[in-house]
Image (spheres, rainbow, N blue to C red):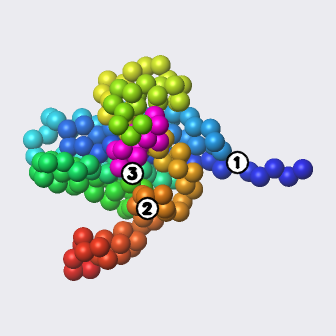
């Protein structure tokens, strides 16, 4: 009797931010998920926005080098009333995306509502409710210092729950490299001169 090999992959989830960036790394083996690591990158000690972006790129690159993820899932910036905050979050997400794309690692984006819905069943869940559900799902006891760590972990778990082994669909953006990202961005008018 031939058994199909169980698919395994490492997913890096990132909750980009310019004060604190949260991340979570999980292993998906078949339908089983296990926690590898989670944590935060504190950026509030840096005054210059450019230095914060550089640190996000460097730390994301270091996480990729250490854990060798098969894909990177990111929380997309939410739409708010403060355009300056949205621009800064978009830049933070962009440099994290660039770090993954630079290593030819596919990236996926999910809205905050989709992430909460996937983890808790309720798209309006609080950060605390998401963290509590993750403690149960991923079987860990310690409470992270910052909820941003569990937010990053939630992005990774959300991606795993989509059953996505590489293709797009399901209301998320997916890019397999710089070429795909630039092509989609130029078609949407987001990147000009390409």
Q: Is residue 23 left or right of residue 2?
A: left
**Few, some or many C-alpha atoms within 10 Å of disc 3 (few <14, some 14-19, many ≥20)?**
many
Residue position for label 1:
6
Q: From the viewer's perspective, is residue 96 above or below residue 186?
A: above
**Few, some or many C-alpha atoms within 10 Å of disc 1 (few <14, some 14-19, many ≥20)?**
few
Residue position for label 3:
110
Q: Is residue 131 left or right of residue 159?
A: left
Work out whether mark 3 precedes mark 1 in sequence or the reverse, and give the earlier one: 1
113 within the magenta span = yes
Given this view, does label 3 or label 1 mark the residue nearer the observer? 3
Q: Residue 134, position in %: x, y? A: 47, 30
Q: Nearer the viewer, residue 87 or 64?
A: 87
Q: Secondary structure at mark 1?
A: loop
The magenta-colored residue range is 110-121
Instruction: Find the residue positioned furthest to the right.
Output: 1
Q: Nearer the viewer, residue 96 or 158?
A: 158
Q: Nearer the viewer, residue 136 or 16?
A: 136
Marks 3/1: CA–CA distance? 26 Å
Residue 50 - label:
none
Residue position for label 2:
174
Specify the quadrant that holds the C terminus: bottom left
Q: Residue 90, position in %: x, y? A: 23, 54
Marks 3/2: CA–CA distance? 10 Å
């Amino acid at each position: 009797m031939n058994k199909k090999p169980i698919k395994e992959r490492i997913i890096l989830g990132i909750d980009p931010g310019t004060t604190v960036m949260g991340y979570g790394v999980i292993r998906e083996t078949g339908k089983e998920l296990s926690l590898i690591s989670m944590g935060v990158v504190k950026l509030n000690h840096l005054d210059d926005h450019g230095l914060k972006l550089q640190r996000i790129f460097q730390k994301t690159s270091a996480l990729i080098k250490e854990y060798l993820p098969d894909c990177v899932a990111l929380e997309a910036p939410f739409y708010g009333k403060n355009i300056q905050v949205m621009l800064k979050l978009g830049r933070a997400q962009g440099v994290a995306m660039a770090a993954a794309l630079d290593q030819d690692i596919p990236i996926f984006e999910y809205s905050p509502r989709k992430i909460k819905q996937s983890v808790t069943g309720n798209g309006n869940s609080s950060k605390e409710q998401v963290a509590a559900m993750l403690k149960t799902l991923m079987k860990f006891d310690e409470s992270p210092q910052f909820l941003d760590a569990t937010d990053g972990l939630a992005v990774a778990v959300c991606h795993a729950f989509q059953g996505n082994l590489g293709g797009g669909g399901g209301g998320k953006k997916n890019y397999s490299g710089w070429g795909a990202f630039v092509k989609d961005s130029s078609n949407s008018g987001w990147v000009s001169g390409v």
